[in-house]
Image (cartoon, rainbow, N blue to C red):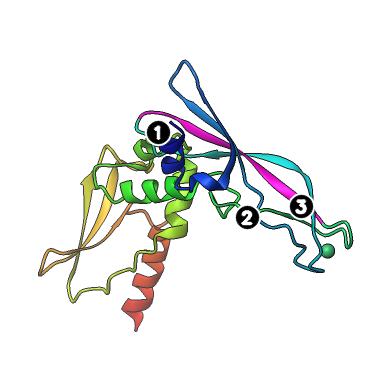
Amino acid sequence: MRQFITNMLNIQEDKIEELQTIVHSDGSIIINLKLNVTSKICPFCSRPVKIHGYYPRTLTHSTLVNRKCSIVYRQRRFICPKCSYSFNEHNPFTKANDGLTHETKINILKDLKHPEDTYTSVAERYHVSKATVLRLFDKHVDIMRKPLPMVLSIDEHYFPESDMDSLYCFLLMNFITGEVIDVLPTRRKHSPCSSARIFWSVWKAELKS
Ligand SMILES: [Zn+2]
């Protein structure tokens, strides 16, 4: 079990000082853990530091299918008795303050590649909010807009599964090749969607030039 957990957390066994797994009746798992002490030297004055305390950080770690898994990581804080500088030990599970482990983020981004998946379905699968999935997507995925073709055809397509407010998405295609240039959530110029607004302003600028 211990090795299974360390594999799942993508961390070496010898780095863990304490590990306790709690399985709830609904199947959800909570892993309480503490890492071994690594740094003992003050980065400022190079003197030995003391442990200042432990701060529990709850992280969502969704690598198990159909099970919610959280890590309660008791992150150690050090203090230098000489210069009073205090600092956290290195956190191997996440860099950001968003409470998601690296593995969870990678899984979410991978699943967003599937055309049949929506933000909502991915959010449910990984036990996070839809807003979290959207934020991850916006932060990590930067899709370049394709250049406008010689002849542009535009069309609306009924899309009831859409996450957007409009039931009709707005398709921009190359009239000659049929290639899709972009898909916008709505054709409306004054839509709350920023990409639709950008499209209309770029479109106007390119028409003028
Ligand atoms: Zn110091």
In front: 179, or 128? 128
Q: Is residue 127 positioned above or below 149 on the image?
A: above
Question: Mark 1: which secondary structure?
Answer: helix
Task: Answer with mark 1 or mark 3, whichever residue precedes in sequence.
Answer: 3
Amino acid type of the residue that numbered disc 2 sits on in the rendered structure: His
Residue position marked by numbered label 2 in the rendering: 90
Give the mark nearer the N terminus: 2 vs 3. Answer: 3
Q: Secondary structure at mark 2?
A: loop
User: Within 10 Å of the Cα at label 1, are there few (<14), some (14-19), or many (20+) other Cα atoms?
Assistant: some
For image coordinates 45% across by 30% down, the residue present is 68
Amino acid type of the residue that numbered disc 1 sits on in the rendered structure: Glu
Which circle's residue, 2 or 1, is located before the other in the chain?
A: 2
The residue located at (47%, 39%) in the rendering is 61
Q: Residue furthest left?
A: 176
Q: Is residue 70 magenta?
A: yes
Helix, strand or loop for disc 3: strand
Quarter of the image that includes the N terminus: top left
Predominant secondary structure in magenta?
Answer: strand
Q: Which mark is residue 78?
A: 3
Of residues 42 and 187, the one drawn nearer to the viewer in this rendering: 42
What is the distance, in whole Å, between disc 2 and disc 3 at their CAs?
11 Å
In the drawing, what numbered circle is on residue 18? none
Q: Nearer the viewer, residue 203 or 81?
A: 81
Residue 49, horizontal then vertical, whole percent: 79, 56
- Look at the image and give the residue range highlighted in magenta: 66-79
Q: Residue at x 60, y 52 (%)?
A: 91
* Residue 124 - label: 1
